[in-house]
Amino acid sequence: MKKMKLYEPDDQMLSLIRDNYNVLQNLSAFGIGMGFGTKTVREVCEAHGVDTFTFLAVVNLTINGYHSQNDIHHLDVRTLLQYLRASHRYYIDFLLPFLRKELVEALIEGDRLGNLIIKMFDEYARFITHHMRYEEQTLFPYVEELLGGERKAGYDIETFSKHHDQTSEKLKELKSVIIKYLPSDPLQSNLLTATLYDLYNLEESLALHANVEEAIFIPAIQELENMHSPIDPMANLSSLIGSTTESGETLSEREKDVVVGVVQGLTNKEIADKLFIAHNTVITHRRNIARKLQIHSIAGLTIYAIVNKLVEIE
């Protein structure tokens, strides 16, 4: 079995491209141009104002399928937004129109089946475009507000995740029709075969794009949401009194220890070190605490801790 190569800041950027040409699209989406010679990943990223850790998280996911939940809180969300917006422009403004032009040139003009294939592609392109524009008009502004320290009620990343449609079935149908349609004329067949190859590459590229959103972007936004709440914690002060939660469940002693750590301003890692538990365990405790208490802000947890005498008001 081939050993997985995880790329690091001091690797040469050129070596990433040699190992997998898909990195070229990553570079473009991060706003990184060619001509970097033998510079390292860190040097190239810093020269272009790109967060190195976030760049490598995306690259290692798209090339090796590697990601770790421990890395989520180190990601730079603004860099991810830049990457996703640029990726959308690549698909909507360049790749989809380019593939449509390829299809038109490969199919026989006026042919009824050829016209149907074009129509199927146009429907698929509209589906992709609609999905990406929804993200740009609804999701991305919501994330910008989170980055600004605000969180409005009525929307969250979980809502987006549940409706994160997969588009592979529509493209599979289109490819199937093209395969059955391949004409016997060698020139026409070569053109359509080349277009079909590009459609397969499009499918792979969009799958990687969706994987970045699912494995990296969505968890990163969930971390942001845990830091902000659209609810005024003082409005629910009465529900914080007493150790029994709204759901009837009580916090465990370990969960209370985590609450104290959060209120004291400790990071997840610092809490883990203090309690001698794993970092992921702290994250799990915090999710359980938020679920049980229905409190998602540090201010709300502080009130809960004071009312229930977990910490002194000072």
Image (tube, grey):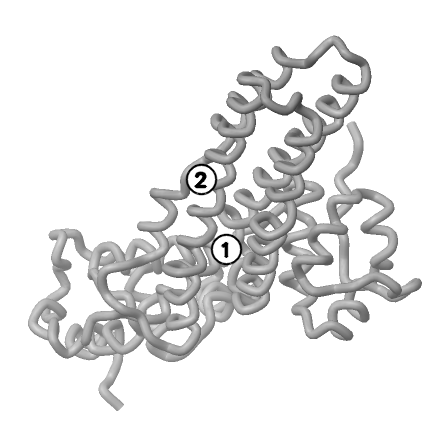
User: Where residue 244 is drawn, which disc sits there?
Assistant: none
Q: Is residue 161 left or right of residue 100?
A: left
- Residue drawn where x is 51% and y is 66% of the image: 269
- The residue sitting at the front extreme is 110
Depicted 281 relative to depicted 39: above or below: above
Q: Is residue 196 left or right of residue 172?
A: right
- Residue drawn where x is 71% and y is 43% of the image: 63
- The residue sitting at the bottom extreme is 314
Residue type at numbered disc 2: Phe
User: Where residue 217 is drawn, which disc sits there?
Assistant: 1
Residue 277: where, in percent of width, then height?
47, 57
Q: In this view, does 147 lie to the left or right of 215?
A: left
- The residue sitting at the left extreme is 238
Depicted 73 relative to depicted 211: above or below: below
User: How far apart are the two marked residues, 1 and 2, measured between alpha carbons?
Assistant: 21 Å
Crowding at dot 2, Cα within 10 Å, few <14 / some 14-19 / many 20+, comes out as some
Crowding at dot 1, Cα within 10 Å, few <14 / some 14-19 / many 20+, comes out as many
- Residue drawn where x is 75% and y is 17% of the image: 189
Q: Contact, CB < 8 Å: mark 1 with mark 2?
A: no
Is tag 1's residue or tag 2's residue first in the polypeptide sequence? 2
Residue 60: where, in percent of width, then height?
69, 49
Q: Name the residue under label 2.
A: 127
Q: Is mark 2 on a helix, strand or loop?
A: helix
The quarter of the picture where the N terminus appears is top right
